[in-house]
Amino acid sequence: GWEDTSAAGFAGTPDYVAPETISGLVSVGPGVDVYGFGALAYFLLTGAPPFEGKQVVDVLHDQLHSDAVPIHIRAQDLSAEFGSLVMRCLNKAPGDRPADGVALVEELMRIGRTGAAPRTRGGLELGALS
C-alpha cells in the first residue's frame, strides 16, 4: 500500500490518479474518471499498473512524463481495438481521452458488439458489454 497522498496536494490512489490531478495546473473534470478507468482496466488486464516505482514520487513522475508500456505487450491476446481504447484513456491530455464516462461506455458497447472486447481473462468471466 501507498502512503497518504493528501499532504502532497491531491487525494487519490497513486496508481490510478490522472496527470492533471498531480500537476494541479488544469482544473479536473470527467477526464480524471476516464483516466482512472484506463488505469484500472490496464491493471486488471495485465496484472500490473500502468506505471511502477518503488516510491510514490516515482509513479507520479512517470504518470506526468512517461508513456505506459503498451498494453498489447503485456496482454498479447487482447484485441487491438480494446487495447487502443484502454491506452487512449491513459493519454496525458484530457482532451485526448474519451470525453467522459458516457462517451467511454458508448465506445465499450461498440467494441462489445464487434466481438473485440475480452470475455474472459485468466479464467474469470468478464461478462458481455452489450
Image: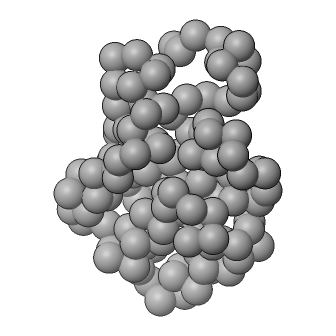
Taking the image as shown, residue 111 lies to the left or right of residue 52, namely right
Q: Residue at horizontal 39%, vertical 25%?
A: 58
On screen, residue 97 above or below 60: below
Q: Quadrant of the C terminus?
A: bottom right
Residue at the spot x=35%, y=47% of the render?
66
Q: Residue furthest bottom?
A: 114
Residue 83 appears in the picture as rendered? yes
Q: Does residue 29 sit above or below 24 in this rendering?
A: below
Q: Nearer the viewer, residue 112 or 19?
A: 19
In this view, the residue farthest toward the top is 3
| Left or right: where 112 falls relative to 20 | left
Q: Is residue 73 above or below residue 39?
A: below
Report the number of numbered marks.
Answer: 0
Residue at point 40%, 72% (across, down):
84
Residue at 51 percent across and 13 percent down: it is: 1
- Image spot of residue 74 (x, y percent): 24, 51
Q: Nearer the viewer, residue 129 or 60?
A: 60
Quarter of the image where one finds residue 23 = top right
Inspect this view and state whether residue 75 appears.
no
Q: Residue 120, percent across and down?
A: 41, 59
| Residue 52 image position (x, y, % from top left) | 35, 31
Left or right relative to 53: residue 101: right
Q: Position of residue 41 (x, y in %)?
A: 50, 52
Left/right placement of residue 43 relative to residue 9 reads left
Most distant residue in the front direction: 25
Please determine whether, in this image, residue 53 is positioned above or below residue 41.
above
